[in-house]
Amino acid sequence: MTDVLIRGARLLGQSGADILVRGGVIAEIGSLAAPSHVASIDADGLVLLPGLVDLHTHLREPGREDAETVATGSAAAAAGGFTAVLAMANTSPVTDTAEAAERVLELGRSAGLVDVVPVGAVSKGLDGVELAEIGLMARSRAGVRVFSDDGRCVSDARLMRRALDYVKAFGGVISQHSQDPRLADGQACCHEGEWSGRLGLPGWPGVAEDVIVARDVMLARHTGSRVHVAHVSTAGSVEVLRWAKSRGIAVTAEVTPHHLALGTELLAGYDPVFKVNPPLRPSEDQEAIREALLDGTIDAVATDHAPHARHDKEHAFPDAAFGMLGLETALGVVADLFVRPGQLTWSDLADRMATAPARIAGLGGHGRPLAVGEPANLVLVDPDASWTVERDASRSRSRNNPWHGRTVHTKVEATFLRGACTAYRGRVAPAGGALSLEELS
């Protein structure tokens, strides 16, 4: 473990200070002399934040290592400023047993770049019929606390109620992919509206999300358990969430950078990179979810990083796989949307991308204050560095990057996992290790 002195960083975007990281924790903060044999990073003008936490990452391993592995996804996460990611359960085999969850945990520890936290399936095989081994996964070494059939909706209300009852006993949470399959079936591939009509594509109406969100917040109220709404994309869902929170119902929600920043007009070219689930929405929905993130109705930003091999993505739009990359660009996209225009402070961004996600997932060592004695899970950000996204420069194994060719004006300079520098100025540490003193100088 390399001790590091970070000199002159702006903590949460405020006044500058020196931060000594020693033994994996923040040891001192102030105006500090550089101890001997300690790597020193000049962070003048840079912003120091808690390491980012992603509630929604698809790492594809086991089963689809041609699209992503835990190691390549971890490298992309570290490069994007993340110190913890929640690995969704729709792998092959599905993460629906204690053994499968422990295997994902072990793969993450072997990669050693971010904390990879397994998400357990709600139902066996994601089939929506019978509960998965929720209790065994919770009691396993993986200590699973978040459960989701993401990619599929838990559409059976009785099964959803049983899952909420089950996780309540140990403080777990059900993360729901809100898509009523009778309103938006497997053929639906874009938002139902003007563009689906123009392009002749099967539509996915916003109400298919809204009705599941409404049902689930009522089930959460009935059970006294916790539900988390994944990738909110509609104004109707925001309205329901705002009502639920005003009544103290235990519901939290996330939104993706791509739903915040990208709209339905991008479908005009039939480019399958813009095919996601839920689909990109029109401006009135975008405005609603942006406002909801600003006022706290939506708690967190999550990437829904969804890598795909080219032979799955490069098809005619209706036949292409759903999903796009997001780990390496999330911070820059969100900062450009909200921090640079002055709608969010850096402290606000840290709350939406680190503190709130860690709280929702029950990760006590992440999203912590920048204070002496706290774990050194940190990210250094250059708030004025412009860079152009290049898909072939991604650490991900896949190339379905919607931001290719776009200029972003905020860049991750360095990421630290318990004091170990996992990424620095474009370099990512080898698996299980950290960048050396020489590489930091």
Image: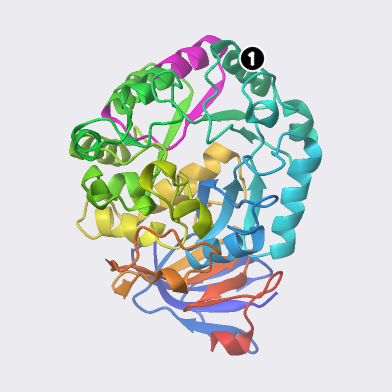
Is 225 inside the magenta-drawn segment?
yes
Quadrant where the N terminus is found in the figure:
bottom right
Question: Image point 69% across, 64% down: which residue?
Answer: 111
Q: Above or below — where is 47 with respect to 199? A: below
Name the residue type under label 1.
Answer: Arg
- Whether residue 154 sits left or right of residue 100 in the image: it is left
Quadrant where the C terminus is found in the figure:
bottom right
Q: Above or below — where is 296 with respect to 405? A: above
Question: Image point 62% across, 75% down: which residue?
Answer: 429
The percent position of residue 294, horizontal first and vertical second, equals: 28, 41
The percent position of residue 6, horizontal first and vertical second, equals: 50, 77
- Whether residue 221 sits left or right of residue 65 in the image: it is left
The percent position of residue 279, horizontal first and vertical second, equals: 35, 39
The percent position of residue 276, horizontal first and vertical second, equals: 40, 43
Q: Which residues are magenta?
A: 214-235
In this rendered view, identify the residue nearer to me: 245 or 114: 114
* Residue 254 visible in image: yes
Q: Which of the 4 image quarters holds residue 238?
A: top left
Q: Residues within 10 Å of mark 1 (few under 14, many from 20)?
A: some
Q: Which of the 4 image quarters holds residue 309?
A: bottom right
Question: Image point 71% across, 69% down: which residue?
Answer: 432
In this rendered view, identify the residue nearer to me: 301 or 62: 62
- The residue beneath circle 1 is 162
Q: Secondary structure at mark 1?
A: helix
Is 326 inside the magenta-drawn segment?
no
* Residue 307 visible in image: no
Question: Image point 46% across, 25% down: which residue?
Answer: 251
- Whether residue 275 sits left or right of residue 56 in the image: it is left
